[in-house]
Amino acid sequence: MDHIVDTRPGRGDGTLMPGGAGFITETRAAARAAGITLFDVNDPEQGITHVVSPELGIVLPGCTLIAPDSHSCTQGAFGALAWGIGSSEAEHAMATGTLRVPRPKTMRVCFTGRCASGVTAKDMILALLAAHGAGGGAGHAVEFAGDAVLALDMEGRMTLCNMATEFAAMTGLIAPDSVTLDYLRGRRYAPDPLPDWSGLRTDPDARFDREIVIDATVIEPMVSWGTSPGQTIGVSGRIPADADPRALGYIGLAPGQPIAGVPVDAAFIGSCTNARLSDLRRAAALLKGRRKAPHVHALVVPGSSAVKRAAEAEGLDRIFLDAGFEWRESGCSLCFYAGGEAFAAGSRVISSTNRNFEGRQGPGIRTHIASPELVAASAVAGRIADPRALA
Amino acid sequence: MTPFTSLTSIAAPLLRDNIDTDTIIPSREMRSTGKTGLAAGLFAPWRYLDADARVPDPDFVLNRPEYAKARILLGGANFGCGSSREHAVWALSEWGIGAIIAESFAPIFETNCVRNGLLPVRLPRPAVDMLAGRIVTVDLAAQTVDEHRFDIGAEAKEMMLQGLDAIDLTLQHAAAIAAWHARDRVNRPYVYLESGA
């Protein structure tokens, strides 16, 4: 239960989404009738599917994992073949235990070197999108490799793979290593002991249909300026002179304008991209002892109920609340009108989510996607800001 | 599924790149759990000046009288990107679109089209541009749009031509699938969670 649920405190089956409560009760009844385990609205393990499945060790290396949600590629971070499908394909999978899939072409995206301090997995994937466009991965399954990828923890790797769908790739995946095994060991559905998955890696002499190399050392905190995730620049950058006029018309910015300093009305930390515990820790570290700008509507929506509990045990909720953020129950929330909520019409939102499409977060809403750190820094400044200045 | 053989219609140009499924059918327009009742919400953010009051924008391509009965839609690159919502295809079909000709499609959307008998046709952008506003004929067996030839996967083509149901087709291999699962269950027992686990 993630897309449809309310994330306001004290929630039940009620939701602002028209027909939402009916959807929840129908899903519950159908799951019970079919003997399917459901992590229900108030289950301790409730949350966004791409957050909950790894937390419980449901996704495992070498698995084929599908779900009727485009961000299912998140779980490729575990060396699983994980991708999003539509409802008909979900029906096919449940009826046959299989899917009919054309073999994708292969691509390796290698991030060489290490990211600078304050630069995150979100900035890496946005840098890829900025360089190669939202259609850059079309027709391919992508392996992410290189020192900067190996240096990421599992949560960072999930952030990276999460947006493979924004690259038009079938999926993104990362070869499992000791970081993967350490994460999975002891989780509820993970086997004990863990099997030998060391064979799940690309052969040294393997040939990819396409290879992209990105120098991770020069990536800076990234932020989108337009209405496609590929319309993204470094936070110190300016809107391109040849920027798509339609996107600029919607977003209300001009060519050559610096992106830093653009005033924001709202700040959102949440989603399957960036609402895991490490995301909240890094944002909270910047917000501690600070306060959001008075006019900014700011909120944090943990990716799962388990993340929420863990964050509260560390006192992160207090930091966010003291900084003037709302502290919500887990769900997809304002990433896209989930639970029936949207930002005020026409607002400009700095958001740790994955899509900056026209109207994605509500009619006329102008979304800028970035890391949780950049969202936190911008909430404090009241305008798009480089988080490294606060660190 | 209704077979697709050929389709002749005026081609309505919506020649933008990265048209996403949130725009094709916004979440707030998905008001039921079924596959119908979606056509009114199709392209709601672009089609209406006021979506709540359903005030049409006369400039939007599908609102122009010459395209009121268009069954072929033209698009740019990465058509149908974003959310996997199959409602986008259902909404297009319900409105009357039978084929989309675009430079490229997002992968989930493309599969959703094939599963619902809506033909996704990939052509180079200059060819797509040339079709705008013309009466064109898409012939799936010949893999042509007028004078242009297009590529499509052999299986997708066959399924669409014959209106085959993917599940029926796969279940012809039920014995082989069961045998594979039985072997895999031995090799990777941890993948097979028991009901209620």
Image (tube, rainbow, N blue to C red):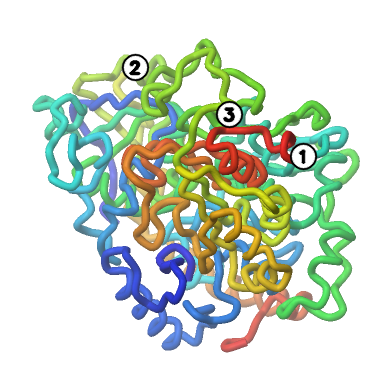
Q: Foreground mark, 1 or 3?
A: 1
Coordinates of residue A17 in the picture (x, y in percent): 32, 63
- Report the disc number at residue A118: 1
Q: Foreground mark, 3 or 2?
A: 3
Q: Visible in this render: residue B54?
A: yes
- Report the disc number at residue A23: none
Q: Nearer the viewer, residue B112 or A276?
A: A276
Q: Secondary structure under badge 1?
A: loop
Q: Foreground mark, 2 or 1?
A: 1
Residue annotated with mark 2: B129
Q: Earlier in the sequence, mark 1 or mark 3?
A: 1
Residue B15 location, quadrant = top left
Q: Give the residue type at disc 3.
A: Thr
- Which residue is painted at 82% across and 38% down in the image? A117
Marks 3 and 2 share the same chain:
no
Q: Secondary structure under badge 2?
A: helix
Q: Is residue A244 left or right of residue A376?
A: left
- Report the disc number at residue A232: 3
**Position of A56 relative to A301 (above/below):** below
Q: CA distance from mark 1 to mark 3?
A: 18 Å
Coordinates of residue A348 in the picture (x, y in percent): 43, 37
Q: CA distance from mark 3 to mark 2?
A: 27 Å
Coordinates of residue A214 in the picture (x, y in percent): 77, 29
Q: Is residue A165 left or right of residue A2?
A: right
Q: Secondary structure under badge 3?
A: strand
